[in-house]
Image (spheres, rainbow, N blue to C red):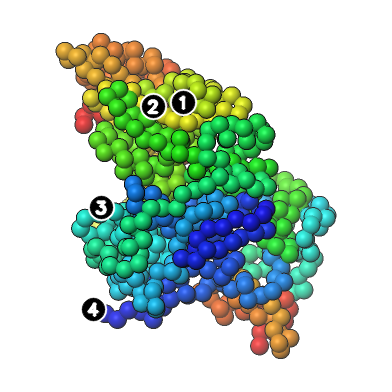
Amino acid sequence: MVDLSFELNGHPVAASGFDPQTTLLDYLRMVGLTGAKEGCAEGECGACTVLLVAPDGERSAYRAVNSCLLFLPMAAGHEIYTVEALALNGQLCEAQAALAAAGGSQCGYCTPGFVMSLFAEQYRPGREGACDPHQMGGNLCRCTGYRPIADAALSLGKPLAGPFLDRLTQPAPALVAIQREGFSRPVSIAECSALLQEHPEAKLIAGGTDVAVESNLRQRRWPHLISLEAMAELRVFAETETQVTIGAALPLTDILLRWTHAPAALAECLLPFASPTIRNRATLGGNLGTGSPIGDSAPWLLAMDAVVVTSGQRRIPLAEFFTGYRQTALAAGEFLTAIEIPKPFAPILRFYKVSKRRMDDISTLSAAFALRMVDDRIAHVRLAYGGVADRPWRAIEAEQALLGQEWNLASIARAQAVLERTLQPLSDHRGSARYRLAVAQSLLEKMWHE
Amino acid sequence: MSNVHESARGHVTGEALYTDDLLGRFPRLLHAWPVCAPHAHARLLSLDARPALAAPGIVHVLTGADVPGEGNTGANRHDEPMFPTEVMHHRQAVAWVLGESLAAAQHAATLVIAAYEPLPAIVTIDEAIAAGSFHAGPHRVSRGVIAESDLMFEGELRIGGQEHFYLETQAAIAWMDESGGVSLQCSTQHPAEAQEIAARVLKLPRN
């Protein structure tokens, strides 16, 4: 691979001669910046956390991301900070001093990652009051314990004036097109479509939170990667009277920030979806495009009657998008550009994620329910599930059993009986078929009780 | 407020060095990567390292034949064969590939052909009790005579305790030092134990 350049800790750097699937983490460690550590190589532990400067309107924000999930060419044009940059003239930054003072490190291996996430949280634009310890949800500690680490976050207020704060008043770097051996980063849908014609075997990569795991842990190699990160058309967010449009490559963090009056079920879905470090990179297009039967966004979007828009200018109802296990209706060379959610939304919307851990875990089962009542009768209902079939699944027969009925336990029992007959989940290490069916049924009751 | 502990500054600045952070100090370091068994319990029937040895950047594939001393790294019970003929847990290492780069070793590890005969695996406590399969003999702590007690309670206690995993990855660097001895830098809490085991495996004096 030929050269690429980016800004690292305030200095321009040029990297050349690297395989396109080299991670940013491996690169950093190779050039002697060993503060970022590898703990898991799959974005679970956060020991590799670094900061990207991301757009925040006309200004910027620091975003904590997993450097193990960023391929080096994806760093091109970015402005990146590692833990080595934070202490200016030997003076610890506030996040570093707070973690040290609170006794927030024992073996210390996870600590640089915590520092980076806490730093990003302290400098988060518009943040009020103390820092939120949950913003370090993508960082695992196995010996210190989280109490002193949370204390450190709670002790931090507004950041001090200085170069790191000044930086945020300026725009984030604009990402430009890149064309290298084995890696391309187009800036328009037309350019991307042309690249896919030229490289039909290419792998599309948005945030990288899924693709890089396959590379790191299963040694998967692709002949060509096409990054969707620099396509402005795929990073839109727009809300009108009739619909919400979300660009397929807009990170989940930006969706949460920009959709200011979203239904509460959006946060119910996206907050346990993954840690902040993953949400800073992961996209709806990636989560839907990979076609996983347990992706968390699909049930939620199914319940919202979402429509996906493709580069072939097709608008496909999400309910028709998944055609089999990790199979979608996308044609060769076609990719997702946006997700449209029609308005008005159903007044009652709930999202449930059932997993072994509450956060930072893959769903055993997820469910999203939408309900509209007219004259005490169910006039509109959507029951959508993840983790119960070979694809995200809408329980259409059970919906029909509820339609026109009163919303009570007797109606729910009838819908549960239909689920018993129509739902055929798999047994695996996350849960047995029997368990999944029981959960799918009982979540309806849970919604009724709530 | 109590004083900040002596390692805190190194931890929060990232200046504290761990084993894997030291690679840059060793030019021409060989990287070792394990060939892992895909079974929880199995007999290893054969191992063919030739495809791995033919891969670019591969120097050697370590097997039991390379061990000059005792091929066992178990600390006390000598119950961890380095190159097992009977696989005792999922992803137990059965051979190690030595390559000029980590990527080369990782790739070549997938090329080693190992043939296994899967054996029944015991994966729950109940199955272990039923099979009489225990790690060690019974441990007893006794005082007094229970049968003479005024009250007796019976029950079963299950605890979900497990060995926690260390965030620092398992890594070790070995080199021949200036005195002709073998030096080790490893991610361990037990330097004396690591030294004793390395000497035993390599058939070298401990001191």
Mark sitting earlier along the chain (2/1): 1
Q: Quadrant of residue B118?
A: top right
Who's the residue at 68% across and 58% down the image? A17
Q: Position of residue B100 (x, y in %)?
A: 73, 64
Count residues near mark 2 (Cα–Cα under 10 Å), then give few for <14, some for 14-19, many for 20+: many
x 49%, y 48%: residue: A175
Check if mark 4's residue and mark 1's residue have beta carbons within 8 Å: no
**Mark 4 or 1, which is nearer the eye?**
1
Tag 4 subunit: B
| Residue to which mark 2 is pinned | A340
Residue A249, position as x, y percentages in the image: 46, 38
Other residues around mark 1 within 10 Å, as few (<14) / some (14–19) / many (≥20)? many
> What SS does tag 4 mark?
loop
Q: In the image shown, does B64 or A333 lie closer to the viewer?
A: A333
Q: Secondary structure at mark 3?
A: loop
| Marker disc for residue A309 | 1
Tell me the residue that label 3 is attached to. A126
Q: Which mark is residue B1?
A: 4
How many neighbours does mark 3 have within 10 angstroms: few (below 14), some (14-19), or many (20 or more)? Answer: few
Amino acid identity at mark 1: Val
Helix, strand or loop at mark 1: strand
